Image (cartoon, grey):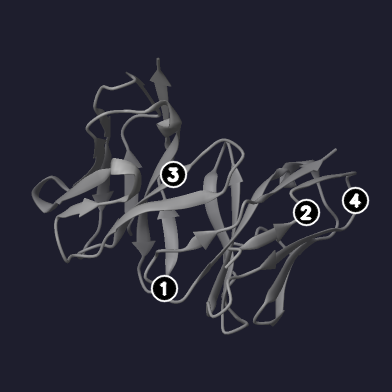
Amino acid sequence: DAGVIQSPRHEVTEMGQEVTLRCKPISGHDYLFWYRQTMMRGLELLIYFNNNVPIDDSGMPEDRFSAKMPNASFSTLKIQPSEPRDSAVYFCASSQDRAGGYTFGSGTRLTVV
Amino acid sequence: AQSVTQLDSHVSVSEGTPVLLRCNYSSSYSPSLFWYVQHPNKGLQLLLKYTSAATLVKGINGFEAEFKKSETSFHLTKPSAHMSDAAEYFCVSLGGSQGNLIFGKGTKLSVKP
């Protein structure tokens, strides 16, 4: 298996623009997680899905952020409009269960200027 | 609420000497604990996990961790550091019924030749 695949690896965008981050989980994994990593706040859970259904989105910063999982092999995290404070590395992870041994993607480094 | 505290933000060792990365947890029940490693500009990789089967847990790349309930600790050790071990290490607990990972602040390990 190729692991969890995220795209793009790097994204530089101007403030106010829409940004879409993509994730392909490992086949057969029922759980998908979106995390954000910053120097100030470390790693934070944004949202997670079980069988394509959002279970907990309490970590989503505000209405500018939205996440979807239209099918078992694809998820998106969208920021509209983007702001400089959204600059971070966004990780997607997937798992067969909630036991904690999650497989992380390589992340998307987002820079909003 | 569950939390993990990594006692050192930065640890520096010489190649061939032992590694000790410290982690304390707080939990009202027997926790699931993990160590993840993040190499520069890479995603997170699971090193090892504790799920109450055995207090001494062996992981990949020669690392191991010992769960000590009396000390609420889960320190990560390796007998002999290698240059390739230079990375950031995260002590992680599994957050209650949500299935989300609660990350410590991380410890950056430097290995000197």
Residue B15: % across, % down? 34, 20
State whether discs 2 and 3 lie on one chain: no
Chain letter of disc 3 in the image: B
Q: Quadrant of residue B37?
A: top left
Amino acid type, mark 2: Pro
Specify whether A23 is left or right of B58: right
Q: Where is mark 1, residue-wise?
A: A98
Residue placed under numbered mark 3 in the picture: B37
Q: Secondary structure at mark 2?
A: loop
SS of the residue at dot 4? loop
Foreground disc of the pair 1, 4: 1
* Marks 1, 3 in one chain: no
| Residue at mark 1: chain | A
Q: Dot 1: what SS?
A: loop
Q: Which chain's residue wears label 2? A: A
Q: Give the total number of marks visible in the rendering.
A: 4
Q: Which mark is residue A8?
A: 2
Q: CA distance from mark 2 to mark 1?
A: 27 Å
Tag 1: Cα neighbours inside 10 Å, few (<14), some, or many (≥20)? some
Q: Residue at x 60, y 57 (%)?
A: A105
Marks 4 and 2: which is nearer the front?
2
How far is the residue under mark 1 from the one under mark 3? 19 Å
User: Can residue A101 be seen in the rendering of this structure?
Assistant: yes
Q: Closer to the camera: disc 1 or disc 3?
A: 3
